[in-house]
Image (cartoon, rainbow, N blue to C red):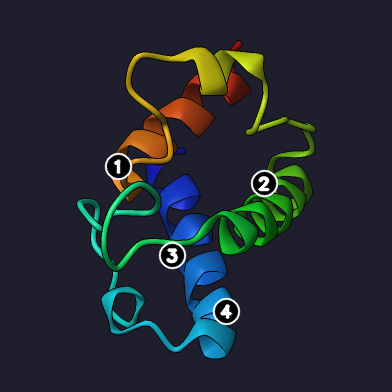
Amino acid sequence: MREKIENIIYETLKELNEELENEAFENPSLKTKLYGGNDSLDSLALVSFIADLEDKISDEFSKNIVLADEKAMSSKTSPFRNIESLTLYIKDLLEN
């Protein structure tokens, strides 16, 4: 499951990057920063990324999840800090 989630995140990020043309997202890894630093998504791009990602996760796992909810926004460490943290967060949402 984790590998499937990672692949969906990579695919979604690469599709978004066709518009953004950000070098940091050309060859993403688990440590690629998504939000909150240089070479990361701005708030508008993050919203687009989250919406696309929620749709793809729903299609793949037949379960609707909400990534930008109160739990995510109130966490001491954001699930959007890098691909690894987002993968684990999505996995947790799908399992519960």
Q: Earlier in the sequence, mark 2 or mark 1?
A: 2
Which element carries disc 3, helix, strand or loop? Answer: helix
Q: Amino acid at mark 2?
A: Ile
Q: Which residue is mark 1?
A: 84
Q: Are marks 1 and 4 in contact (CB under 8 Å)?
A: no
In this rendering, the count of numbered labels is 4
Specify the amino acid type for callout 4: Glu
Query: Observer-nearest residue: 58 or 86?
Result: 86
CA distance separating discs 1 and 4: 18 Å
Q: Residues within 10 Å of mark 2 (few under 14, many from 20)?
A: some
CA gap, disc 4 and disc 2: 15 Å
- Dot 1 falls on a residue whose secondary structure is helix
| Residue pictured at 63% horizontal, 33% vertical | 67
Mark number displayed over residue 57: 2
Is label 2 in a helix, a strand or a loop?
helix
For disc 4, the neighbor class at 10 Å (few under 14, some 14 to 19, many from 20) is some
Mark 2 or mark 3, which has the lower sequence index? 3
Q: Which mark is first along the chain, 4 or 1? A: 4
Which residue type does callout 3 highlight? Tyr
Q: Which residue is mark 4?
A: 15
Residue beneath disc 3? 10
Residue drawn at x 77%, y 52% as measured from the top left: 55
Marks 3 & 1, CB-CB < 8 Å contact = no
- Per the model, the C-alpha gap separating discs 2 and 3 is 12 Å
Label 2 vs label 1, nearer the camera: 1
* In-image side of 31 versus 57 (left or right): left
Q: Are marks 4 and 2 in contact (CB under 8 Å)?
A: no
Pointer 3 and pointer 4: residues touching (CB < 8 Å)? no
- Rounded to the nearest whole Å, what is the CA distance between mark 2 and mark 1? 16 Å
- Please state if 69 lies on the left or on the right of 55 as rendered: left
